[in-house]
Image (cartoon, rainbow, N blue to C red):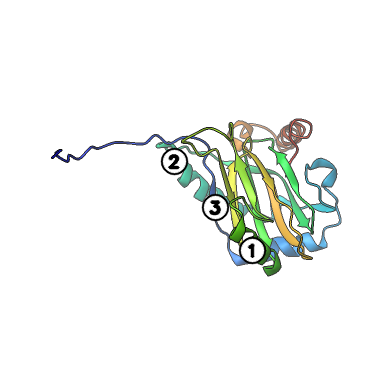
Amino acid sequence: MKEKREIQYRTLRWGPCVVHFKVPDKFKQELLAEAEKSTESYGHRLAGHLKKEVRLDSNKYKHYFNDLFAVYNHALGNWMGQTKDLRYIVSDLWCNFQRANEFNPPHSHGGLLSFVIYLKVPKDIKEECLKHQEIKSSAGPGSIAFFMGDSDKKNSLTNNSFFPEEGEVFIFPAWLKHWVYPYRSDAIRVSVSGNIVDSLGLDFMSPDGIQAAIKDIEKQSPKKGKNE
């Protein structure tokens, strides 16, 4: 009889660091209140096939974003096995009002990181997704999916998909390809998205110089892969 022996092994961490968690309810409500009042269309800059996408003012929420970025930095340090003292600036912020049959095609963003916060997730869309998952193994209606590399590689995970919960945020590298599935339910799902730059290179600029740098970064994304 073959003798059993214990073998110790390690696995290598690989790929992008994607973090998701719940944001404070007060933050969610403040974003939703501004989004419902905003009349500044942002759709001309975005990849989404959505009728209503509006710009928001990121300066109002600096204290909330600082907390979000602290969580991501902690997770990134654990993921990479080293701590990085990075400071971030939200270069642009917008709200998506997604309706039946609307979607976001595969795309990436400009900058260092991107994020999406789900403010309203109607029950009808969740039920539609659950019914889909009873008969299909693919991501369901209304899901967000992330992917990198070739999808047919064996013994590897090249994609991840999630049906988001209300109040949940996903923070991910801006270069990471992702898309949002359409749904058929007669309901409006509301989410806020944004792009993030590392402020380290902006520390010695004047306020006007910082704004000019942010605008330059924003111009990098539209043709290659527009924002979400």
Vertical position of residue 127 compared to residue 17: above or below: below
* Residue type of the residue flagged with mark 1: Lys
Count residues near mark 2 (Cα–Cα under 10 Å), then give few for <14, some for 14-19, many for 20+. Answer: some
Quadrant where the N terminus sits is top left
Residue drawn at (52%, 47%) of the image: 72
Return the residue nearer the eye: 134 or 211.
134
Residue occupied by mark 3: 20
Q: Which residue is mark 2?
A: 79
| Mark in front: 3 vs 1 | 1
Q: CA distance from mark 3 to mark 2?
A: 14 Å
Give the secondary structure at mark 2.
helix
Name the amino acid, label 2: Trp
Residue 188: quarter of image: bottom right
**What residue would you read off at disc 1?**
131
Q: CA distance from mark 1 to mark 2?
A: 34 Å
Q: Amino acid at mark 3?
A: His
Quadrant where the C terminus sits is top right
Q: Residue at x 69, y 56 (%)?
A: 142
Disc with the residue nearer the chain's start (3 vs 1): 3
Query: What secondary structure is found at the residue carrying circle 3?
Result: strand
Question: In the picture, residue 213 is in which quadrant?
Answer: top right
Task: Tell me residue 175's x, y (percent).
Answer: 63, 35
Instruction: State which tag comes first along the sequence, 3 or 2.
Output: 3
Image location of residue 187, percent across then percent down: 77, 65
Q: Where 124 falls versus 145 (above or below)?
A: below
Where does the image place residue 26, in percent across and percent down from the top left? 63, 66
Quick one: label 3, few (<14), some, or many (20+) residues within 10 Å?
some
* Upstream in sequence: badge 1 or badge 2: 2
